[in-house]
Image (cartoon, helix red, strand yellow):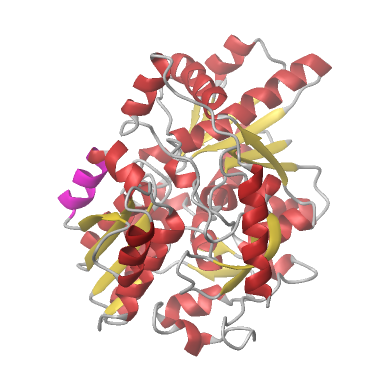
Amino acid sequence: MEPTKIILNESEMPRRWYNIIADLEHPPLPVLHPGTREPIGPDDLAPIFPMGLIEQEVAQDRYIDIPEEILEAYRIWRPTPLVRAKRLEEALETTAKIYYKNEGVSPTGSHKPNTAVAQAYYNAKEGVKRLTTETGAGQWGSALSFACNVFDLDCKVYMVRVSYEQKPYRKIMMESWGADVVSSPSMHTGAGRMVLGMDPHTSGSLGIAISEAVEDAVSNDETKYSLGSVLNHVLLHQTIIGLEAKQQMEIAGDYPDVVIGCVGGGSNFGGMALPFLQDKLNGKNLRAVAAEPTACPTLTKGAFAYDFGDTARLTPLLPMFTLGHTFVPPAIHAGGLRYHGGSPLLCDLVRKKLIDCRAYQQTEVFDAALVFAKTEGILPAPESSHAIRAAIDEAREATFQGEERTILFCLSGHGHFDLSAYDAFLKGKLEDHEFPEDALEKALENLKEVSN
């Protein structure tokens, strides 16, 4: 019998992260200082990041060693299983083979600890005592709270208001690891008070929460800021997902025709896809598909431009596909995908046509989630369900065309804290949200101001 699960031994866990920048013929555009419009340097980033992470942000090396202290923490849950989704294949009556990498087995239930542990380690190593961050759905906030507990750091989490209200148990999880969690926008920062003054009933956004966390970090000694997606060093840490998956696919005697992940900022998609895109750059026939919500279609409808990563304009200018730093997405349940921009590295690969992008409605995503739950037994996170939707569509297309196709996707997390969303879907109360075209026009006007 072919195995359902392919599990590596701890001794087989990758000991280096992969940096795709070393294999690109032309590097991505630089991040710019908003005042000078010149490429930022280490001194510009030093107020919010430790030097160890700054060095990784600009690294040109193909591989970067993982410190033993990080590997030791990883061993709590890594390596994660690669699973052949045989029951899903049977239900779809497909000619395709479907595999998924289950990152939901981590202590916090998602892929996020892969970078949270690394970031907490490098901060603690340089004497930082406290970290601030934002979180959408709560997966990143949970991961950093866990990691700060591992390395004895204080943690302050600004949680986007809509998710703070939708997912109270994520808040309790963070507090159980010792974090201080507040609803964003809050009265704790100038950025939060400004937003509340303009719209006291706002649902919040990751852009607003980032502004609060950055302001908090630069206003307090011995405090740094930690980001769960978007930046190069974050995607670097996440490549352990794809590196493990490549070993496991080799054990399975198979190789993916298509690699899929959901995309908000880009951390889990990049973590899965980048090691495989190395093969594509070397001539391998492979497609990488990024799945996002129609309510926040950054890659499929956004404009490519230099824009701020946050609402209050406290971050450097990032070259990315963006809906505008002032854009507040509808209150969909995939809170981790409600971000106005994308990783500059992934956006560069989209422009180079190395990545395909698709957008999905909320209800079709939850429909796919239930198909997965009823076949594979796992209730997936709404974010991960975008990848499942894309994988099902790929399988059906392969069947329609009468071809074999090997599909690999990242199950970035479980949905145990998303039961209110499933309850709404099962009761027929979950609504679809189209991206408002007039919002794009307003965003483009704001981008003109930024470019000037």
Compared across the picture, whether 341 is left or right of 304 comes to left
Q: Position of residue 280 (x, y in %)?
A: 77, 51
The residue located at (39%, 64%) in the rendering is 118
| Dominant SS type (magenta) | helix
Q: Position of residue 231 (x, y in %)?
A: 53, 65
Magenta stretch: residue 173 in it?
Answer: yes
Compared across the picture, whether 75 is left or right of 357 comes to left
The residue located at (30%, 50%) in the rendering is 142
Q: Quadrant of the C terminus?
A: bottom right
Can you say whether 131 is above or below 100 in the image? below
Q: Nearer the viewer, residue 342 or 120?
A: 342
Q: Quadrant of the N terminus?
A: top right
| Residue 71 appears in the figure | no
Can you say whether 42 is above or below 207 in the image? below
Q: Position of residue 92 (x, y in %)?
A: 62, 12
Compared across the picture, whether 196 is left or right of 268 comes to left
Q: Nearer the viewer, residue 380 or 138?
A: 138
Q: Which residues are magenta?
A: 169-177
